[in-house]
Image (tube, coloured by chain):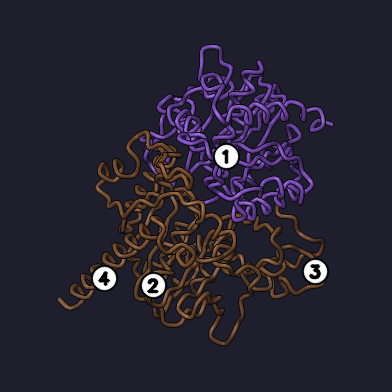
Amino acid sequence: MEEVPHGCPGADSAQAGRGASCQGCPNQRLCASGAGAAPDPGEEGAGPEPEVKGTEHHLRVQMGNAGWGLLTASLASFVSRRVALLDIDICGPSIPKIMGLEGEQVHQSGSGWSPVYVEDNLGVMSVGFLLGSPDDAVIWRGPKKNGMIKQFLRDVDWGDVDYLIVDTPPGTSDEHLSVVQYLAAAHIDGAVIITTPQEVSLQDVRKEISFCHKVKLPIIGVVENMSTFVCPKCKKESQIFPPTTGGAEAMCQDLNVPLLGKVPLDPHIGKSCDKGQSFFVEAPDSPATKAYKSIIQRIQGFCGSHQSNNKNHVNS
Amino acid sequence: MTSSEGWRCAQPRTSQTRFSLEPRNLASVQHIILVLSGKGGVGKSTISTELALALRHEGKKVGILDVDLCGPSIPRMFRAQGKAVHQCDRGWVPVFVDQEQSISLMSVGFLLEKPDEAVVWRGPKKNALIKQFVSDVAWGELDFLVVDTPPGTSDEHMAIVEALRPYRPLGALVVTTPQAVSVGDVRRELTFCRKTGLQVMGVVENMSGFACPHCAECTNVFSTGGGEELAQLAGVPFLGSVPLDPDLTRSLEEGRDFIQEFPKSPAFPALTSIAQKVLQGMPALLS
């Protein structure tokens, strides 16, 4: 189904991305990076799980349905520790744009791929950095996506970081299974699940929660995004996405899962994301900024107690 | 998930089963439209649902095939959650939303015992079910089959295009929000359409502004203009902008017919206009 140029050497060939017939192929950069040659992790004996060294905490931000990645960005911004942000939405990599890193490239060194740094303490990796043009589509089936994810985890030299945050696409499929599998040895602290208030979103989030239980992934909590809207003119509140079944609050009570917080809809968020600017710097007093700060504190609290539990367990 | 766990009467085949393509199951379907988006959460299922309802109001018979296997939203949007799929001699009978059988649905949502059960499948298994949805559902006579897809350009998209290609020229309707972040992903979706031979009928911009119910001030909650700019850039028709409309959201939550019940609501003119443009665009698609 993917359009291959005549004389394509094959994605797993040593000439992948480098041959004469590769010129002009939209997957050229990806193949040249070696992504196609990674063994299918769905196969038995596909090799050891990749080691992600140096990270104390691994958080997985799981989108039950897409929340435009801002929470991921916020988690990284507020935590004044060293943070790594890995975007595994292979088909729809939005993180480079949101973080103002469009057009940046990934460099290779002896120790692996370098993440792209937003700040000294915030490094980002995304397939978006490997695409030549904004129109390039990543039309890959599951196994190839899994290969890319494995490579990100294995070959990126994150350095010493305190938090690795993994931004996932919506769903419960290859990407989600793979990242849980590959990070199993590294112990994921937990998952943060984003939703909007309506039932259409919540019904997917219940499945995400069920997925977490199935794969024994702890749930740090749920964030309700786009909760209410405050009109910039009359300052009155409206609910653009009515919580017809009680919103995230009711769902969290039913399923005994923490509600980390509710983030109101602020039109400046969208604008900041589009410009790749930090919303928190642009609007430090916005109710949305305050909501994010409170959510981060709760996440840090969870990770802190999670870590000391692990240490106690090891020492006992 | 094995076939013995949590599946209702209609069971998916395993990948070892030989598929016999039954061309007659799609033989009486006049037009097939895929609703796509690069990004999640932009309202594909909303647009699929409202397009179906608007086409029904124009007297058309419509089917909706929901191939978002991980997040099947369509059943709830028609108040059809919990309905069972029955078998007939031609295969699975789609779920009808009314006695007149003017709209019929197929979704993995109907096949799950528990609605909150996650479909945690890798690509090959998803592909197999999608092929089965195409070959084994007895759609009968339809004017339109609308295919609601998950976000992205991956297994489901490749599977559905491969499976549908023998039957009809395929049209694609691409949904975005005004934000550049969404548009960025939709540009990639348009590339997918080009590479797979899907004719893009147009771009729909959803969540395009919100009129405050208290003071009527319109705010561009998710930025502005991205959809129209994208359509111009890509050289495809711009079908319209649908504003944020809590009545529309509520209708979908409750499985109501928005087109019938809310003709004065902000989203109504845009949605009916989009359906008109789809109807007008059909001859060009077939030629």
Which residue carries the number 3 mark? Answer: A23
Residue placed under numbered mark 2 in the picture: A163
Q: How busy is the neighbourhood of tag 2: few (under 14 within 10 Å), some, or many (20 plus)?
A: many
Q: State whether discs 2 and 1 lie on one chain.
A: no
Q: Nearer the viewer, mark 3 or mark 2?
A: 2
- Give the letter of the chain under mark 4: A
- Mark 2 belongs to which amino acid? Tyr
Chain containing the residue with disc 2: A
Q: Nearer the viewer, mark 4 or mark 3?
A: 4
**Quadrant where the image shows the C terminus of chain A:** bottom left
In the rendered picture, chain B carries what hue? purple
Residue that numbered label 4 is attached to: A304
Tell me the chain of label 1.
B
Q: Amino acid at mark 3?
A: Gln
Give the distance between the C-alpha atoms of the residues marked 4 and 3, in whole angstroms.
49 Å
Task: Report the disc number at residue B44.
Answer: 1
Residue A79 horizontal/vertical position (percent)? 37, 71
